[in-house]
């Protein structure tokens, strides 16, 4: 049962802080977890510092991520500040809770074999929809474009079958993005289907991937849905696949192939090379696993 003080806190967050339903739901779950975790000490309103710290330490023992632990810590800290302000307690038992260290999470990456299976599944789709999905996937994997950059491509940028695209990325900075022959072939096939589907008296959309939606172009959500279905068709867990994962695969596979880190930084449009360096960890981990599992002298005794 939710204590009345927690209900009052959530009401305050909704009315005074204009918290969204999603945020309120997260706070409610986090505080319910803390209430259950301190039940032996009488719950949140009776718990002392030791009880709160024991509950907090249990989060990592239960396998919760640093990000989740940090969010629950924040919820409890804010709750007790509210309780103090209301005069319901004279102390804050959460004051000594330290924020967990949150190392940068390694990006999810598909293997080369996974990408090939994903492409093969998409290629089996009939009609213009299949050609569009192939063009989307080949462009993302060949160029490392962000999904926002990919879906903002204008049709006139690819009409002449270029080997490079000029892309405007974050902060309005322009960069060159490469297109290999496979990607160019997929784009030209999609262009033919796109043009054939357009009514002769209708004005052409400026976007390479037009849509009937309000924006006039395909949305990231729709692209993600198409990828999910392709992943299912390929026998790959759709949770491992997203438009951004194709960008991660582009970078990681380049580094695995011996590409220079600075070159990959430029191709991705990263302002700071530290952002690019995370892919070296992914590539190293994958190569280490290959050696461990495939090398004849690395067999477990």
Image (spheres, rainbow, N blue to C red):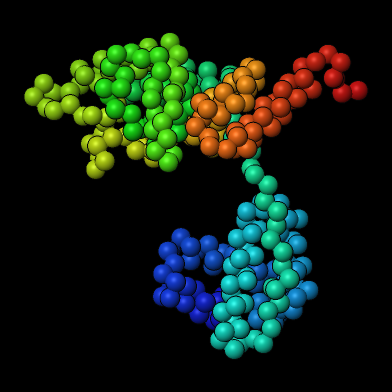
Outermost residue to the right: 301
- Give left or right: position of 98 versus 131: right
**Where residue 196 sits: x, y (%)?**
20, 17
**Where residue 6 sits: x, y (%)?**
55, 76
Who's the residue at 74% across and 61% down the image?
A: 58
Who's the residue at 59% across and 67% down the image?
A: 75
**Where residue 68 sits: x, y (%)?**
62, 56
Q: Quadrant of residue 264?
A: top right
**Residue 107 vertical placement versus 76 (above, below):** above
Outermost residue to the left: 201
Who's the residue at 26% across and 22% down the image?
A: 156
Residue 251 visible? The answer is no
Q: Quadrant of residue 176?
A: top left
Closer to the camera, 262 or 249? Answer: 262
Position of the C terminus, as image quadrant, is: top right
**Residue 235 vertical placement versus 120 (above, below):** below
Who's the residue at 60% across and 78% down the image?
A: 81
Position of the N terminus, as image quadrant, is: bottom right
**Where residue 286 sits: x, y (%)?**
69, 26
């Amino acid at each position: 049962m939710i204590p009345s003080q927690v209900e009052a806190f959530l009401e305050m967050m909704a009315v005074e802080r204009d918290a969204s339903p999603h945020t309120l739901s997260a706070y409610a779950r986090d505080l319910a977890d803390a209430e259950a975790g301190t039940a032996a000490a009488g719950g949140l309103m009776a718990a002392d510092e030791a009880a709160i710290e024991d509950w907090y330490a249990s989060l990592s023992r239960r396998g919760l991520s640093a990000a989740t632990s940090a969010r629950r810590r924040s919820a409890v800290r804010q709750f007790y500040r509210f309780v103090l302000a209301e005069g319901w307690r004279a102390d804050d038992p959460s004051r000594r809770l330290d924020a967990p260290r949150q190392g940068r999470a390694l990006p999810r990456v598909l293997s080369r074999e996974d990408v090939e299976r994903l492409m093969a599944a998409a290629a089996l789709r009939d009609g213009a929809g299949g050609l569009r999905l192939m063009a989307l996937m080949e462009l993302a994997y060949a160029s490392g474009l962000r999904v926002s950059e990919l879906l903002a491509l204008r049709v006139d940028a690819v009409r002449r079958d270029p080997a490079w695209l000029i892309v405007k990325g974050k902060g309005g900075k322009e960069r060159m993005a490469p297109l290999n022959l496979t990607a160019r072939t997929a784009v030209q096939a999609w262009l033919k289907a796109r043009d054939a589907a357009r009514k002769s008296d209708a004005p052409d959309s400026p976007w390479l991937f037009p849509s009937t939606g309000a924006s006039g172009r395909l949305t990231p959500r729709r692209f993600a849905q198409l990828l999910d279905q392709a992943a299912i068709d390929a026998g790959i867990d759709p949770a491992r696949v997203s438009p951004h994962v194709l960008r991660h695969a582009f970078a990681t596979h380049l580094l695995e192939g011996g590409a220079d880190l600075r070159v990959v930084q430029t191709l991705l449009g990263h302002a700071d090379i530290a952002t690019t360096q995370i892919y070296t960890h992914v590539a190293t981990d994958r190569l280490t696993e290959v050696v461990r599992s495939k090398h004849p002298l690395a067999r477990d005794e």
